[in-house]
Amino acid sequence: MFEIRRYLPDDSPYLMQLHLAPMLHTGAYHGPGPWDDDLQDVPVAYLNSGGEFLIGVLDGVAVAMGAVRRLTDTQGEIKRMRVLPEFQGRGYGRAILAALEQFAVAAGMTTLILETGAVLVGAQQLYLSNGWVETQRGTVEGLPCIYFEKQLTSTVDGGQGTAG
């Protein structure tokens, strides 16, 4: 059974595997660097500043993760959306995204933004099918990326009714 729960300190040892496996699988990873520093201290990077970090667990094994980082009182940024390659296509990413959107609404955020790699077609489809709108294209650390935004309302029903 798939469950979503908040990050726990015991999750630290396998966060990099959850991060790297999907990135390596798609060719979107270009090596270690300061862009991975948030995974070294999740409480400081996300939880202590009004954000959230969720872990998706299937039969006791962490298979997915995602986070929202508070940028302002009303704006947040979706980060670290990952599903291990062998578990993709089962709705786990969609469930994590919906839970993060629900958290954002409850926390008073009205706008969410994110960026994803241009090679991550599955991620792009996930966001577009959940009411996200592409706002621009650019590069991050030399890799082509796509920026998305979503306006939130006070009712979230699994990600389908949150676009305002």
Image: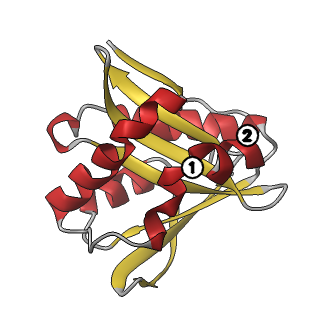
Q: Residue at x 18, y 44 (%)?
A: 85
The answer to whether any part of residue 158 appears in the image is: no
Q: Quadrant of the N terminus?
A: top left
Q: Residue at x 67, y 49 (%)?
A: 44
Q: Residue 75 location, x and y as percent?
A: 74, 58
> Where is mark 1, residue-wise?
41
Secondary structure under tag 2 reads: helix
Q: Is residue 26 left or right of residue 38?
A: left
Residue that sits furthest to the right in the current view: 73
Q: Residue 100 location, x and y as percent?
A: 58, 39
Secondary structure under tag 1 reads: loop
Front position in the image: 28 or 123 = 28
The answer to whether any part of residue 5 appears in the image is: yes
Q: Is residue 70 left or right of residue 60?
A: right
> Where is mark 2, residue-wise?
105
Q: Residue 34 location, x and y as percent?
A: 47, 72
Q: Is residue 115 left or right of residue 17?
A: right
Q: Residue at x 35, y 47 (%)?
A: 82
Give the alpha-carbon distance from disc 1 to disc 2, as whole Å. Answer: 24 Å
Amino acid on which the number 2 mark rests in the picture: Val
Front position in the image: 91 or 144 = 144
Amino acid on which the number 1 mark rests in the picture: Asp
The figure's colour scheme reads: secondary structure
N-term-proximal mark, 1 vs 2? 1
Front position in the image: 28 or 102 = 28
Q: Quadrant of residue 141?
A: bottom left
Residue 54, placed above or below residue 20: above
| Viewer-side label of 1, 2 | 1
